[in-house]
Image: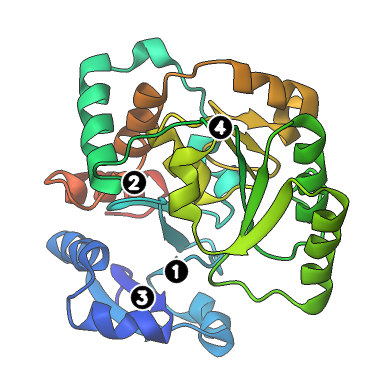
Amino acid sequence: MNERHLSIYLDDWILEDVRAGRHNFFRRLIGAVEAAGWSVSLHETGPEARHEAPHKPGYALYRMEAPTHARALTCRRSYVGAFWHVEKMAERWDWPVAQATFAANSVDGEAAAQFFFAMRKRLYPGVKPSNDDNLAFIPLQGRLLDHRSFQAVSPVQMIEEVIARHDGPVVATLHPREHYDGAEINALEALNARFPRFRFQSGGSHELLPRCKFVATQNSALALEGFFLRKPAVLFGLSDFHHIAGSVPRDGIEAAFGKLRQTPPVARYLYWFLQLNALNAGRPEFEDRLRAQLWACGWPI
């Protein structure tokens, strides 16, 4: 096996679809590197495979896992549509797009508007947003009692900070793929007992998003989706899409909430963040842009 070989490491549940050619992003990625004269092999990821990977010739690609060595990269879907990133590190808030400066005036307004309305129609067909309920929406993620390194405060403390700064209803939703233990549910119930205008529920996020006044979250994808409905956001965690949001880690909590009074250029931002800075596996130029990204990351392709 020569240097121009790519080993792709995937979880078992996605590996079958990729081997069968049913996963569009990986099908086109494999085709792009093979067209450049590379060979490709697929592997199930896991501790043993990750331990052995640095000792294999060629290059490696993971999905939503940290790269294991200097010749490895990771990839991850960019929240919506067919948008993906291939990067040197797994933490989204360290990606180049997170560090870049968004300059709205440098973005083509007409192209941005076309992109914005087409994506909005695809994501939320027929939905008419409102904020008549004066509702703050908090899509929760995991580990509600922990204050992790990328967070300004723990998720439970985040809820209290929102309640302290918003006079209307505050509704939190549990993440459908997270497991919450008794202590976490007890903490949410205690907040409900202290603050009757706070409630939490399983499901209903996509019904709450069009009705809310703003989104508050650590870094949930629903905040980015909310931009398509012109819903402002306050982020309590580090994120790659912080640029037009209020960011507590970046701005401090009062300044972050102060940004809710601004009207950000959401169409230009989403076009810049997704179409210009991510890889769109639904576009004909995907292969060329992918190979350019791999070259920029140091791969000889």
Q: Nearer the viewer, mark 2 or mark 4?
A: 4
Where residue 261 sits, quadrant-wise, is top right
Give the farthest residue toward the top. 105
In the displayed structure, would residue 96 be above or below residue 150?
above
Horizontal side of 260 relative to 162 (left or right) equals left
> Which residue is tagged 3?
7
For mark 1, what is the residue? Answer: 62
Quick check: 251 above or below 237? above
Identify the mark nearer the N-term, 1 or 3: 3
Circle 3: residue type: Ser
Q: Mark 2 = which residue?
A: 293
Eyeballing the image, is 128 above or below 173?
above
Q: Is 267 above or below relative to 149? A: above
Does label 4 or label 1 sit earlier along the sequence? 1
Q: Is residue 154 left or right of residue 177?
A: right
Q: CA distance from mark 1 to mark 3?
A: 9 Å
Q: Which residue is mark 4?
A: 213
Give the residue at x 33% y 69%: 3
Q: Position of residue 119 (x, y in %)?
A: 26, 40
Q: Earlier in the sequence, mark 2 or mark 4?
A: 4
Q: Position of residue 299 (x, y in %)?
A: 36, 54
Q: Nearer the viewer, mark 3 or mark 4?
A: 4
Q: At x 25% / y 80%, what residue is drawn?
A: 17
In space, the residues marked 4 and 1 are separated at their CA atoms by: 38 Å
